[in-house]
Every structure is written in structure tokens, then in C-alpha cells.
Image (spheres, helix red, strand yellow):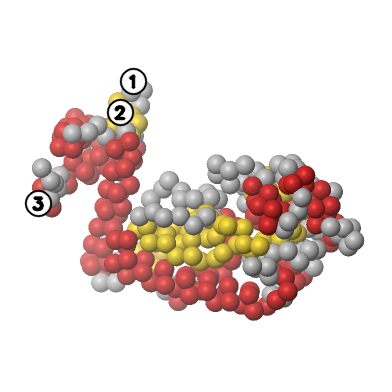
Amino acid sequence: MLINRPWLPLNALRAFDAVGQHLSFTAGAQALHVSQSALSRHVISLEELLGKKLLERRPQHLVLTEEGAVLLPVVRKCFDRLEQVLNIIRDGDASGRVLRVHMPPSLFNHLALPMLRDFRREFPDILIDVSSAHVTGLPPTELDVAVVYDRPNVDDKITDLLWMVRVTPVCAPELAKAAPGLALGEFIGANELLHVKLDGQPRGLLWANFLRQSGVADSADRSTERGLAFDTAISAVNYAMSGGGVALADVDMFEDEIKAGRLVAPFDQVFEEGYGYYLKIHAEDLADPVVSLFRSWLIGRFQARAASARASAEPERVVS
């Protein structure tokens, strides 16, 4: 039997939301100001309706089952959205509307901070909660808008490319002095390699791909696992600027450092590394005017920023 709108078990869903958030019947009951037994009955009734266990009851704690982990973020998002819209209707405007946004650390700190500042000046009634923890792929928390660093992929979300990463080896000026007269492979082989960690990928993947595209011999390619690995591109570039090694850096994201001479790109090879920054939202959130506004605004700002970076780049440095 299909569960249609007239039969949605709202009280049971609210009980499951409270228990799932705290992974505790006691804490969930306290949050809703109801008895623990009443809360437990509601969750059991929801499990019976679905014919699936949502929570696994262990001696000392609760854990979400696979089905519970699928349902909980959807329930939380629906209740959050209802709460926001009811407050907007009651107050007559969007004051207090909180937009939950995730951005990877390097993009956030190096490019997006001034953009978010400008957005707040233009739309002061829209509050923004920013998380910036996960480097690769979608974070596990429920969000309104997520910008992810990833390779192109197909999923159930609306996806827009914000920024394609184009990399070249970069280092401190003192290391770059040794580059003239050396082939790329020789320079790479003579210096410490700096990596950015990618979830589920070997540490030398990006360097191996870059050297392969550059036509560097396999012997140098096999040495790409060595060196230091960092959580973020900013950390790797900062270490490179200190003279600690050679990093693969986005020439557009770090163009200010290169123009100022704090960072040097001693070779002409510039390649798209296969990764980019993608904006992702749930398809149903296109109907949310705040999410739709932020999406369009952010896409426009990144398009303008990318066009400016391309215009200022030297044509001969770009290898397609």
C-alpha cells in the first residue's frame, strides 16, 4: 500500500527525527517534552508502517540502520523547511532565513569569502551558515547548497560546474632558480613533491596524471608517491612558498601569488587535472526562492571570476 499525503505519520516522523538526531530515546523525549515511552511507541509505529527497522537498539546506545540513515536527513530537511517558511509567513519577510552552505576549504578561503561578503551586503536578510570541512565529495550533513571538489559524475542532484581546476608545478622563488636548463622530469625528480589528499585515491594520483599528460618518462612517474600530503590546496601552496617543495596548484586560483612573485610557475605546462568545483542542490529545492537566488548569484560570480582569470593568463601557457 502506498503512503500518500493524508496518511503521513507526522507525529511518528517528528519522534524519529528527535531520536535520530540524538541517537537516544531519553534525549529525544526531553527535546520534544514528551515521555520516553510515548516517543518509543511513535518510532515503533513508523517502523511497523514501513516494515523496516530504522534504529538498531544496542545495549548502550542506538545506531541508525541503512533505512534510517536514508530517511533521517530527508525528515530533518522537511521539518527545517517548514519551520523556516512558517516563520517567514508569520513575520512577513525572509528575515532569519538561514541558508546552509558547504564549500571546500581552499575554494572558500581563497575565492568565495569576498563573494559571500558581497552577497550578504546585497541580501542582508538571508543568513548563511557555512561549513568547510570536507575536501572531496559531498559531506554527510544535510545542506541547502553544497559546493564539492570532485570529478564529473552523475547523481540525483542538480549540478553546475563553478570552477575547473587547471594546474602547473609551483614553488618558492629560490627553488625555481634551479629550473632553467632542467627538463620538467628532472626538476620534479630533484625536489620534494607536495600532494593534496583525495578521498579514496592514492596520494600521487594528481602528480602521476600531470606527468603523464606532460609526456614525462615512466621512471619519474613512478616516484610520485613521495613527499608530503596535505588536507587542502592552500596548505600545500603555503608549504611550497616556504621553500619546502613543489606543489601542483591551480594557476587561476593562485594567480595573485604568482603575479606577486611569492609563488613561481617555472614551466609552461598547464593542464586540467580532471577535478573541478561543482555546485549541487536537490532538484526540489529549485522551488525555494532563496536557494534559487543564491545558486544563480554564485554561478554568475564564478563565471565572471573565471573569465577574468582566463583573460589575464598568458595564451602560450594554456595547454588543451
Q: How far apart are marks 3 and 1 (CA)?
A: 37 Å
Alpha-carbon span between mark 3 and mark 2 = 29 Å
Residue 62: image quadrant is top left
Whether 162 is drawn above or below 71: the answer is below
Q: Residue 128 falls in which quadrant of the image?
A: bottom left
Quarter of the figure with the N terminus: top left
Residue appearing at x 62%, y 62% in the figure: 272
Considering the image in quadrants, where does the C terminus appear? bottom right
**Residue 117: % across, % down:** 52, 70
Residue 30 in the image, given as x and y percentages of width and height: 27, 37
Is the residue 236 above or below the residue 61 in the image?
A: below
- Counting residues from the N terminus, which is met first, the one under dot 3 or under dot 2? 3
The kind of residue on which mark 1 rests is: Pro
* Of 212 and 33, the residue lying toward us: 212
Residue underneath mark 1: 59
Q: Residue at x 28, y 58 (%)?
A: 81
The residue lying toward the viewer, choosing from 69 and 92, is 69
Establish if 286 lies above or below 54. Answer: below
**Disc 3 and disc 2 in contact, CB within 8 angstroms:** no
- Within 10 angstroms of label 2, few (less than 14), some, or many (20 or more) residues? some
Find numbered disc 3 in the image and state the secondary structure of the residue it sits on.
Answer: helix
Check whether the beta carbons of the residues at disc 3 and disc 1 lie within 8 A of each other.
Answer: no
Query: Dot 2 lies on which element?
Result: strand
Q: How crowded is mark 3: few (under 14 residues within 10 Å), some or many (20 or more)?
A: few
Look at label 3 and name its amino acid. Answer: Pro
Q: Mark 3 points at which residue?
A: 6
Q: Looking at this view, is 274 or 192 the one in front?
A: 274
Residue 229 occupies which quadrant of the picture? top right
Mark 2 vs mark 1: in front: 2
Q: Residue 56 carries which label?
A: 2
User: Given the image, on which type of amino acid does mark 2 rest?
Assistant: Glu
